[in-house]
């Protein structure tokens, strides 16, 4: 869903925001890219901590503006309607940078309905994305499960058995572990290893760290320390 609030950002505030550079909550685009790619950036913000997408700003931070803001907004809405599921709520405003050019600021709050997915035409499955540093990356199966669990938090219980103890000892020695490493360590199928790590993360024993290459898990109490 796209809403149009009254302008709340001045050109000076926009300039200060751009000066921060792209990061976990800020993305620049010269104009609306391919629809599925546009949806990917919005979905990643909604699935993480929210953020701002600026249309009319080059990768190097040059504020160019777009010539036809109405057409760009239409393309933005079409991209989200066709490629985002469930729908993502955003707010859009225009900042005039010259008499003929505007920067479109797309405000994306963190969503309570996550995970959101990008649907690509011709593909049977949809893909979730999250924000890592200044990139929008595909969410792992474990991250998707944890996002779903956030919508209906409940007490989690698990049996602390031999394989869990083996995991804890490994983490105390090496600090981090991936699903593949745990599967090999404990002689589990990748699916079973994944489910165990997700369950222990939901229970607050582990933390999942999203990584562009491969997600990994650490002990939660070490992070707190």
Image (cartoon, rainbow, N blue to C red):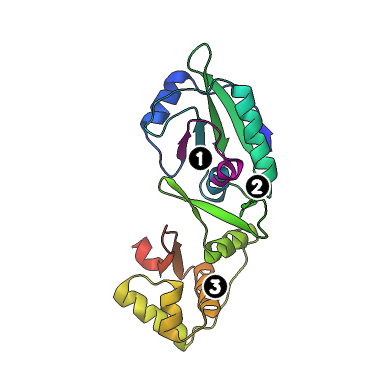
Between marks 1 and 2, how big is the CA–CA gap? 17 Å
The extreme left residue here reads 173
Question: How many angstroms separate mark 2 from mark 3 (CA)?
Answer: 28 Å
- Structural crowding at the residue carrying mark 3, measured as other residues with C-alpha within 10 Å and reported as few (<14), some (14–19) or many (≥20): some
Q: Describe the element under mark 3 as helix, strand or loop.
A: helix
Q: Which residue is mark 2?
A: 84
The picture places residue 6, in percent across and down from the top left corner, at 62, 22
Query: Considering depth in this image, is 77 or 148 the residue closer to the camera?
Result: 77
Q: Are marks 1 and 2 in contact (CB under 8 Å)?
A: no
Residue under label 3, please give it: 199
Q: Is residue 5 visible to the viewer in this orientation of the structure?
A: no
**Residue at the top extreme of this rendering:** 99
In the image, which residues are magenta?
26-40
Tag 2's secondary structure? strand
Residue 204 in the image: x percent, y percent? 49, 68
Is 7 colored magenta in this rendering?
Answer: no
* Residue 96 against residue 109 in the figure, above or below: above
Mark 1 or mark 3, which has the lower sequence index? 1
Q: Earlier in the sequence, mark 2 or mark 3?
A: 2
């Amino acid at each position: 869903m796209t809403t149009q609030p009254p302008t709340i950002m001045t050109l000076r505030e926009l300039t200060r925001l751009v000066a921060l550079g792209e990061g976990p909550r800020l993305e620049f685009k010269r104009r609306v890219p391919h629809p599925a790619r546009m949806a990917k950036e919005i979905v990643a913000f909604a699935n993480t901590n929210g953020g701002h997408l600026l249309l009319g700003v080059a990768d190097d931070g040059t504020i160019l503006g777009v010539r036809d803001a109405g057409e760009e907004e239409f393309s933005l809405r079409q991209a989200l309607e066709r490629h985002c599921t469930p729908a993502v709520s955003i707010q859009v405003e225009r900042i005039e940078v010259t008499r003929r050019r505007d920067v479109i600021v797309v405000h994306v709050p963190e969503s309570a309905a996550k995970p959101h997915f990008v649907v690509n035409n011709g593909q049977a499955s949809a893909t979730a994305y999250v924000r890592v540093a200044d990139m929008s990356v595909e969410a792992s199966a474990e991250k998707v499960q944890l996002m779903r669990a956030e919508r209906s938090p409940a007490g989690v219980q698990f049996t602390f058995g031999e394989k869990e103890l083996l995991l804890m000892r490994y983490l105390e020695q090496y600090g981090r572990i991936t699903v593949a490493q745990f599967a090999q360590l404990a002689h589990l199928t990748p699916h079973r290893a994944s489910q165990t790590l997700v369950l222990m993360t939901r229970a607050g024993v582990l933390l999942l760290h999203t990584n562009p290459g491969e997600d990994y898990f650490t002990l939660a109490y070490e992070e707190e320390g």
